[in-house]
Amino acid sequence: MTELTAAGWDQGLVFTPPPVDYPVFDPAEVREQAKALAPRYGDPVWPFHVISKNPSSTGDAMHWNRFPDGLREQFRHAAWALARFPLDEVYQVRHGSAMRTRLSASRRFKTVNEWLKFALWMDRRGIGKIGAVTVDDLLDYDRYLVKEQGLARSTCTSLLVGLSRLHAYSSKFLPKEHRLIEPPWVEEGLDDYLPAASALGENSTAPITPETMGGLLIWAMRFVELFADDILAAWNERERLLERVRTAEARPAGEVTKEPLRRYLDQLIAEGRPLPRMASADVTGLKWDVGGATTFIAGLTGTPRATVISVLRAPRFRSYAAANPGPCLLGTPVKGMLDGRPWHQDITFTEVVTLMRHLVTSCFVIISYLTGMRVGEVLGLEVGCCPDPQGPPEAPKRFLIRGREFKGARDEDGNHLSDGVVREAGWVAIPQVVTAIRLLESIAGEGLLFDALVHDVRSPEQRSGRSLSTSTMANRIEYFVKWVNNYVAANGRVGETIEREEGERLAPLRFRRTLAWHIARRPGGLVALAVQYGHMRTIVSAGYASRSRDGIHHLLDLETARTVAEHLSDVHEALEEGQGVSGPAARRLIASAKGQHERFGGIVATTRQAKALLADPTLNVFENKKAYLTCNWDRSKALCEIGRAKSDVPSLDRCQSSCANIARTDRHAEQLAAESASLRQQADSGLLPEPIADRLRAKAETFDELVTRHRADRITLADREEQ
């Protein structure tokens, strides 16, 4: 075209880049709150987050100075086409589901970032134009990613698909010398160009250990249930003081008086009280700074901060403050009790900011972990998302959380919807979650529960309409753990630290996997709310049941299947070594152990394998470590089924000794004998009241009888083969 018009650019009809002041994104795509941040073509930085309607989206921005000088404008032109125009459906048909006609904001940014990696590789090879790249160059780049870089299969897939997209966009929107040749994997498929397949993704995310998750959840619940009222009262007092400062500083200069400030300072000196100023660090590692003290004094006296600074420069006050520094005590009473004692001394003006941040973090931990929601789904929740259930007062209350899901949210054409879709089935909330939500609602007032402008007032022009980000929450969890462990050490609360995993961050992305792990294995006593895990399987699964694509359902299946496979593998190994099994289901257990070994070998790596294992009724075997037995689950014979809703797993907290599903191994018998000896030792110590000692002896006798019965009835592989 000889005439370059805005209409031509808007329709993608020209092969030249637009003017430097031309909008990068379609103005209709840009969030209302981010209009002022929308980039122009020539800008050195393009913030992609301005077109994302996901409130928890990260602040993705492309800095063009990272591209090599000779290639920068070629890739900028391609990136502008990617940002502006959808691909024709013919490309999607040819390239498959990976080639969407229009990408999400984050995926567009990631694609340009993938092009950056390719551009840097081209520059090292001395290739100055995209159109000069040959098929051999592309094959070399593929080998570089797979062999030299050793990247994971999923990462290589993303990078190669990114080049397929560069080919598609450059062929349609760029001049000939800047068009990428068609990569060979477009025609032949990706598989031959990728590393060997392995089980990756969310299923391979390491769960958080019981010791760590237990401590984290216990302290989060303490903040929400025991400390929250004190923190909120102190926060409100701080806000009252700040409002007094704002009011004082809004008055005309002629109306400002120093008298209230002088009277306050004179009274402090007369009574010998400390003057709020910089002081030593408290148990959290926080320091009272001069600026905070200035604001605090200004709020107490209704005086502008500049006036406070001016008056405090007087030699009389400077010398007194140096000799008598003190904290900025808000004076709000501390009513929360921890083990019969106040959990904290007087809260200070500066410290309450940290405590408030930890309170919000605690709410996030509780909601995220105890619902199984994805991080973005939690951060996207709004005030009013969990209404009180309707119905007669005597009816059981079942709270449901209504919100949006973002993963896999697509329109009718298969394109990503950045603002997500309203979830058809609500997440079921247990009381602890409801309490955390109500607390956040009281703080936020309206809008998002984790609104960035409410919980972090930095850069308001960029954060309007957005929530705290995933990375921010991950950092806040780390700070929360540090505060708790400092608090525990300072207050002599031995054994209450949050244990840290060496080299592992407590990333909130790990919570879903951890919840599934704990529900499947239910480590009694090591994690707060352990008694509820048996019920939470039904609760959480029911909350996700209407949408099979929700990963928590798959994670529950995967963890349950892994638990079963590991246990049956241990049983098989013990039987091979000549050990025995007793109980009504002994022969079934032996057969199950053999069947699992032949089919899975103790390893369940994928959700497909998990479903196959759980679908086999002969492999539904669950160990009850507290009762020292194994349940060979058969619903028709299960005594734990009586009086409860039907379930796909046994209720291990209701095991009965007469159940036909029970089997015991030699290891269980050894554990029973050891526990019996321990009970007798306690009973004979003389340290317990006689009624308690008698109960312990009776329990020990019951254990002894079970051991005797096991030894009399046990069968081995050899016994089974003889019959």
Image (tube, rainbow, N blue to C red):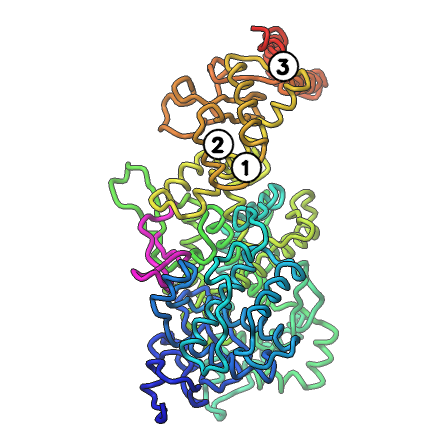
Q: Nearer the viewer, residue 463 or 621?
A: 621
Q: Residue at x 70, y 53 (%)?
A: 490
Residue corresponding to mark 3: 580
Q: Residue 275 at x, y = what percent?
A: 66, 73
Within 10 angstroms of label 3, few (less than 14), some, or many (20 or more) residues?
many
Residue range highlighted in magenta: 402-428
Q: Amino acid at mark 2?
A: Leu
Nearest to N terminus: mark 1 or mark 2: 1
Q: Amino acid at mark 1?
A: Val
Q: Quadrant of residue 193?
A: bottom right
Residue 604: mark: 1
Q: Residue 528 at x, y = what percent?
A: 54, 40
525 sits left or right of 109 in the view: right
231 sits left or right of 696 in the view: left
Whether residue 619 is visible: yes
Q: Residue at x 61, y 14 (%)?
A: 717
